[in-house]
Image (cartoon, grey):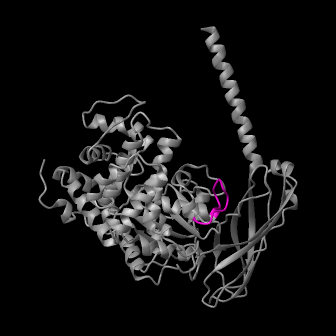
Amino acid sequence: MLRRRVLVYICVIFLTFETFLLVEQQKKITTDVKLTEIKYSDAGRFTGAENKEHNVGLELMLNKSEGSTSHDRGRGYITTTGSPKSQNNEFILKTTDESSEMRGQNSFNNFKPPDLIKKANPSNTIEQYTIKTSYSNNGLNMTDPEVNHRLVNKTIPEVNHPLVNRTTSEVFNDLNVEGENLIGQDKSPFLNDERTKQRVSRLVKVCQAKQVEGRVVRVLIDPTNTMSYCVNHKIASTHWLRVYRYLWNATYKGHVSSPYKITKMEAHLSPIFKMADHSFSHPWDQRLIMSTTRFMFVREPFTRLWSVYIDKFILADNYFWSFYGPKVARINNMAVLPALKPCYHFTFRQFINFVVATGENPDNMNDHIRPIHRLCNPCDFKPHFVGKLETMASDSDTVLNSLNVTWGEPTSWKDHRTYQEMETIIEFNFHLVKDLRLLTRCLNPVSLGKRILRAFVLNGYIPQNEESVLVKKLPLMKERLLDLVWGVYRSTNRTQAKVKTQRQELKIKAFQTIPLQLMHKLQQIYRMDFELFDYRLDPPEFFYNKKTV
């Protein structure tokens, strides 16, 4: 007993020491500098106001990567009090250094305050400001390039307008029904799009009328800090993760010629290099996100569930099979298989039983099946653009044009989007089983190929009558399998209309196996998604001629 206590004490001391070292290391990597007493003088514009000074508070956080001279751009927010009156104002910054530790470790006594020059336009709308930062940190001379930050794009008769800690109602007072966000933005680049106006207007109306629960959990921001994307799974998340890694060169290989050179595995699971995740849980992140143009993508809830079933239980997925497989089995009164051999074969109805059971507490649901607003609450995120997977091609192009992202025009059939989707599925599944040696007790080359072909049929990529023909040619190497299925796609003239029709028919057939009681429970779980994003709560193709039990 004494020996055990001694060991426990030693472990506690060791962990305490390790924690202390990590904290000290973090202090060296990240330093918070508060720039206070930012002042500007004005020459009188608003009636009834005398010349005076107005205090402006700015916080700037400078991050230095350990062992590198690179650092993140300063992130700032501005709050003002008083009444600006002139068309030509000059901001003068003074700094205070309240941390003696900073003085000891860094040369912040020599910190040169950013030059902050602002010119108001005739309508007195603050458009943007420019920060130039030069400082010395740990003996490394670093100069921040010119950084543009957006301010409040709003005519301000009286400025007493903090940009943070705002209520939902206050936020939507600044977001008109035409979709123009007046917080932290110049005019949205999407305002001329009529479909965008309608979608954003819908969000505004629902958010004003309803109490929408949910958070903003994961947001990606482009390198210029101008465009942010709220991540939701099974809604083209792989596509956008690839795009943002491409923008940041956040890959093992460095720069790649196209986002599609980034594998699905790397897009989702590789460490974040230069790119960072942001959320509303940290005030800094929230202010930064709200200073950008924001977009998100949504999807019809029933179709999203069908897609999750195909991707996670028809195709190979070690995490879902191993972690959620036993849970699905228990809910359906099935035998729980050994942990090292989670070879489950669930029907779509059994999967829906699992969704309904876990949906009693949406916050405990897996992100792939959790309602969209729970992970990306549009009433808080306030997107300027809402894309839909049903109009993915045009919506994606709209966002990419705003991001000014191109990677060359398609030069061959290999640039076809369907080809890229096929390639992603085959590459990911083969990598999981053949390279990582996962689920090898459940799948062999033939059974893996069968699952891939089945998924392609359900997605409409290959005709139903071709599935049995292709199965006879298994096993195949991944390159050969890709060439084969793409050859069938082309030789059978699979137009987008044919793909959509087959996909819809098989989806309807699957939902016909779901009793009406379960469908009503799904409606309750995803009701707010239906309302927010303007999807029909009772699509007739899923509810017509249903069983009651």
Q: Quadrant of residue 210?
A: bottom left
Q: Image height check: is 281 above or below 183?
A: above
- Identify the residue at horizontal 32%, vertical 52% (top origin): 454
- Give left or right: position of 20 versus 188: right
Task: Please indicate whether residue 29 sits to the left or right of residue 486 in the image.
Answer: right
Of 108 and 450, nearer the camera is 450
The answer to whether residue 189 shows anywhere in this view is yes
- Residue 536, position as x, y percentages in the image: 26, 67
Residue 520 in the image: above or below residue 52: above
Task: Report x, y in % for residue 177.
Answer: 41, 78
Q: What residue appears at the point 19 percent right and 51 percent down from the top-left corner?
A: 513
Residue extending farthest to the top is: 1
**What is the span of residues highlighted in magenta in the rendered image?**
248-258
Judge whether 53 appears above or below 459 on screen. Answer: below
Q: Residue at the spot x=65%, y=53% of the render?
A: 252
Q: Is residue 177 visible?
A: no
What predominant SS class does the magenta segment belong to? loop
Number of marks present in the image shown: 0
Q: Position of residue 324 (x, y in %)?
A: 38, 39
Residue 36 appears at what percent x and percent y? Answer: 74, 64
Question: Magenta segment: does it hold 182?
Answer: no
Residue 546 vs residue 335: left or right?
left
Q: Quadrant of the N terminus?
A: top right
| Residue nearer the viewer, 441 or 306 | 441
